[in-house]
Image (cartoon, rainbow, N blue to C red):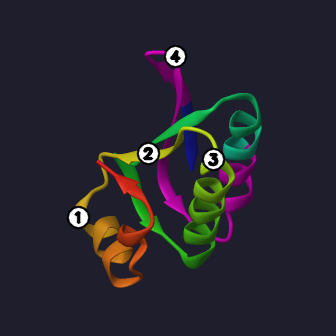
Amino acid sequence: MKINIFEDNGTPVIAPEGKIDHVTVNEFESKINELGEKHDSLILDMAGVEYVSSAALRAILNASDMLESKNGLVLKNVNNKVMEIFNITRFTDYLDIR
């Protein structure tokens, strides 16, 4: 997995590429925590994500909880395969997916 980081109108964007699973989740979560501590909001650009495991779901939910009292977490460009996982797990009820 590769993690790209850039800004969109002053908001940090984390754009992982590949699979977020038990092997790669620690790096993913570390980047989220690092940026989440310094900023009021984050964008996860999921365009390059092929697969999310339960570990990835936990990391995303934790990030959403961490930023809930601030301006929040937004997920963008979620492909159909990953969106299906979000729908099955009902994460669509809790996450801001655009």
Residue at mark 3? 67
Q: Residue at x 50, y 20 (%)?
A: 7
Cβ atoms under marks 3 and 4 closer than 8 Å: no
- Looking at the rendered structure, the secondary structure element under dot 1 is helix
Query: How far is the residue under mark 3 from the one under mark 4?
Result: 16 Å
Looking at the picture, which amino acid does disc 3 mark?
Answer: Leu
Q: Is residue 9 visible?
A: yes
Cα–Cα gap, marks 1 and 3: 25 Å
Q: Amino acid at mark 1?
A: Asn
The residue wearing badge 1 is 80
* Sooner in the amino-acid sequence: mark 4 or mark 1: 4
Specify whether residue 22 is painted magenta: yes
Q: Nearer the viewer, residue 68 or 9?
A: 68
The circle on residue 10 is: 4
The residue lying at 43 percent from left, 15 percent from top is 9
Numbered range of the magenta stretch: 5-30
Q: Position of residue 2 (x, y in %)?
A: 56, 42
Viewer-nearest of discs 3 and 4:
3
